[in-house]
């Protein structure tokens, strides 16, 4: 481990960067998943078509391609906009952090849409009818009846999507964000120990995915605590 | 900012030059991955702890780390060791193509063995017990009862895994391979028209995904022909 002397702080900040991307992308993916699932289950044909298009495109395109399209596309658009105001501008890009988090959020949001849709359908109709009979407003039915019950059904897949977000963060090094894979590349250009350095990156990721898997397991136990006795 | 729709059309043939390599990577790694997956599955189901634990560790590692990191360990990492550079495998391990195939196969094997295990677990116990009662050997029960039923149960998840493999082949572009994403990246570097070129590539990927899903839904219909509702 003396190999890493002088690089500990870089790996540490790289890890912080990964965790920040994970948090932003997760929030975005859950929001998009809830919106997408609501759109797919809505009565409006336009909303259903838009949501269907969203899931088909983002589940069928390589993550790397979405990331590159979003980052370079945004750079082109933002530079064009900036030049409208100041023609001397050379290049403006969306910071890789935001480009990466939004791209990953969009991709995993498409998977979340399908998971949440299935989970919403799994909630007993009688529960919703009962809530309506008690004259709960639509948003109350959504937050107090649908969400707490669909959550339990969505958890196992939700856990897998969280793992996907975590693993997809490695891709953002390709557009130049200084997360752990990028740090390992830099360290390698000085130390020339590629195997050791990339294995360290793998171990860090393994630790994080292990924590996520454990946490989801705990959440599942908690979410199912009322059915434990009944089985 | 200009968006040139005709550029999408004119870049399609150039990106399609990478289609062969994309499909090649997909086919070769899927096949190698499937064979490895069956081996890992058998280890996992063997009930002998010295076989079960390596299989579990394998699945844990390959499902818990990003494929990109696995690819970098194999392509950039292995040459760190002198014995790798001197070994008979070096002509393979210095080629980005074989490193990509190895990374993709090792990665998918972990997922597929779990998918197949799900299928095996889903087979009704009564059926294998009936086979036992009829005096079938363990091998006969595995090949005539468990395997066909498990494959049928595993098909939907397996089709998702193939789609996911198709998408993973794009990572080969990070180790200089000129498959579709690699070609698209090169064209973008020359033209700086990311929207048109990457959208063209996306269209081709979506068509491929559609073909894979259609093929698998036909396979599922065939596999379930005896349970079809009359």
Image (spheres, coloured by chain):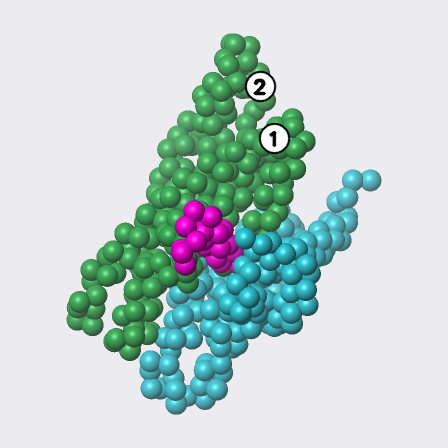
Chain colours: A green, B cyan
Question: Residue A127, percent across and down?
Answer: 54, 19
- Magenta span of residues: A65-90
Q: Secondary structure at mark 2?
A: helix
Q: Is there any visible trace of residue B73 in the rendered image? A: yes
Name the residue rendered at 53%, 45% in the picture.
Answer: A111
Answer above or below: position of B16 versus A60.
below
Viewer-closest of A13 and A81? A81
Residue picked out by circle 1: A41
Toward the top, the furthest residue is A134
- Label 2: chain letter: A
Return the x and y of residue B186 as percentages of the image width and height. 53, 70
Magenta span: predominant SS is helix
Q: Residue at x 31, y 52 (%)?
A: A17
Q: Is residue A110 above or below residue B87?
A: above
- Point out the image quarter for the C terminus of chain B: top right
Q: At numbered mark 1, what does the secondary structure look like: helix, strand or loop?
A: loop
Check the image and report above or below for A204 versus B25: above
Task: Tell me how many marks there are.
Answer: 2
**Residue underneath mark 2:** A126
**Spot occupied by residue B152 in the image (x, y as percentages of width and height):** 66, 53
Give the numbered dot on residue A148: none
Q: Residues within 10 Å of mark 2 (few under 14, many from 20)?
A: few
* Chain name for mark 1: A
Q: What is the distance, in whole Å, between disc 2 and disc 1 at their CAs?
A: 17 Å
Q: Is residue A63 visible?
A: no
Residue in front for this viewpoint, A148 or A10: A10
Q: Going by the image, does A62 lie left or right of B134?
A: left
């Amino acid at each position: 481990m003396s190999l890493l002397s002088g690089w500990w702080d870089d790996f540490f900040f790289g890890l912080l960067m990964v965790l920040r991307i994970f948090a932003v992308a997760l929030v975005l993916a859950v929001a998009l998943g809830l919106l997408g699932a609501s759109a797919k289950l809505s009565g409006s044909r336009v909303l259903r078509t838009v949501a269907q298009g969203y899931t088909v495109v983002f589940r069928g395109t390589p993550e790397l391609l979405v990331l590159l399209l979003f980052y370079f596309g945004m750079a082109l658009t933002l530079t064009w906009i900036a030049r409208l105001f100041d023609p001397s501008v050379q290049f403006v890009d969306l910071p890789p952090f935001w480009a990466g988090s939004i791209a990953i959020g969009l991709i995993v949001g498409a998977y979340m849409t399908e998971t949440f849709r299935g989970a919403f359908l799994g909630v007993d109709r009688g529960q919703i009818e009962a809530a309506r009979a008690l004259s709960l407003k639509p948003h109350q039915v959504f937050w107090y009846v649908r969400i707490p019950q669909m959550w339990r059904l969505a958890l196992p897949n939700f856990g897998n999507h969280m793992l996907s977000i975590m693993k997809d963060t490695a891709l953002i090094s390709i557009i130049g964000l200084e997360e752990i894979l990028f740090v390992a590349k830099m360290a390698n250009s000085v130390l020339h120990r590629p195997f050791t350095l990339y294995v360290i990156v793998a171990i860090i990721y393994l630790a994080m995915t292990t924590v996520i898997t454990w946490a989801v397991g705990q959440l599942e136990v908690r979410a199912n605590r009322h059915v434990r006795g009944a089985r | 900012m200009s968006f040139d729709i005709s550029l999408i059309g004119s870049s399609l043939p150039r990106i399609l030059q990478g289609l062969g390599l994309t499909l090649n990577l997909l086919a070769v790694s899927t096949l190698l991955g499937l064979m490895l997956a069956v081996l890992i599955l058998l280890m996992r189901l063997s009930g002998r702890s010295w076989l079960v634990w390596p299989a579990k560790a394998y699945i844990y590692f390959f499902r818990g780390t990003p494929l990109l990191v696995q690819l970098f360990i194999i392509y950039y990492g292995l040459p760190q060791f002198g014995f790798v550079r001197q070994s008979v495998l070096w002509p393979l391990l210095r080629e980005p193509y074989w490193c990509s195939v190895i990374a993709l196969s090792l990665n998918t094997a972990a997922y597929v063995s779990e998918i197949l295990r799900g299928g095996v677990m889903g087979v009704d116990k009564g059926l294998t017990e009936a086979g036992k009662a009829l005096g079938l050997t363990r091998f006969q029960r595995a090949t005539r009862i468990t395997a066909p039923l498990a494959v049928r149960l595993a098909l939907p998840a397996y089709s998702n895994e193939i789609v996911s493999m198709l998408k993973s082949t794009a990572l080969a572009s990070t180790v200089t391979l000129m498959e579709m994403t690699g070609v698209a990246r090169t064209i973008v570097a020359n033209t700086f028209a990311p929207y048109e070129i990457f959208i063209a590539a996306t269209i081709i990927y979506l068509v491929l995904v559609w073909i894979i899903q259609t093929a698998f839904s036909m396979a599922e219909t065939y596999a379930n022909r005896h349970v079809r509702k009359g």
